[in-house]
Amino acid sequence: MTYAVTFGASGHLAMELLRTKAGLNMMGVPYRGGAPGLTAVMAGEVNAMFINQDAALPLVRAGKLRALAVASKERNPLFPDVPTVAESGYPGFEAISWAGLSAPAGTPPAIVHKLETAMRTVFSKPENKERLERTGLVVVASTSQEYSDFVKSEIKKWGDLIKEANIKAK
């Protein structure tokens, strides 16, 4: 089995996580980004790839791509019939792409609080949240401490996988 890979990208690491959890014998075929990888999947050059839902959604809706599973803990509301990888037989599997607002270490707490409040205000407005969710994104507005804890856990999770799978920079 083959999969499209952009070395070191989130989709590459997600596939390595699935490969190790499922004990699959898979070979990554390198592509210079998600778009060429998606083209290769749709053309049948490779069997699969992990790609962000916002890139996959229009192709799935157009019938050009088949979504097999989502890598989040819960099903995505825009893909209600697509199971999670965990539901598909790999409990505990989660590989999500995320973005967050960061500030330099030592930023005064009052400024952190102000930024946190501004972000919560922006994401609590239905029109902003809806605009992002229409593309397949899931909006989470956490506290700065929750975000810091999440980033630390992601660094550990992916660092451990990189060591276990012996992934090297290319």
Image (cartoon, rainbow, N blue to C red):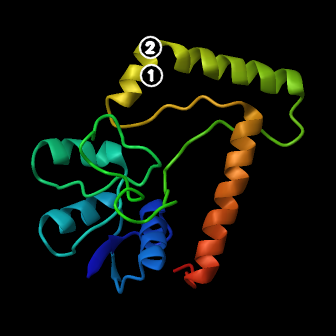
> Which residue is rendered at x = 21% and y = 75% of the image?
46
Q: Circle 2 sits on which residue?
A: 126
Residue 134 appears at what percent x and percent y? 32, 28
CA distance separating discs 2 and 1 = 5 Å
**Which three-letter amino acid code belongs to the residue tagged 2?**
Pro
> Which residue is rendered at x = 20% and y = 68% of the image?
40
Q: Circle 1 sits on which residue?
A: 129
Position of 133 with respect to 82 (left or right) is right
Could you classify mark 2 by the number of other residues whose Cα lies within 10 Å: few (under 14), some (14-19), or many (20 or more)? few
**Which element type, helix, strand or loop, lies under badge 1?**
helix
> Which residue is rendered at x = 74% and y = 46% of the image?
149
**Which three-letter amino acid code belongs to the residue tagged 1?**
Lys
> Which residue is rendered at x = 71% and y = 30% of the image?
143
Q: How many marks?
A: 2
Q: Are marks 2 and 1 in contact (CB under 8 Å)?
A: yes
Residue 97 appears at what percent x and percent y? 49, 50
Residue sitting nearer the eye, 161 or 114: 161
Residue sitting nearer the eye, 152 or 42: 152
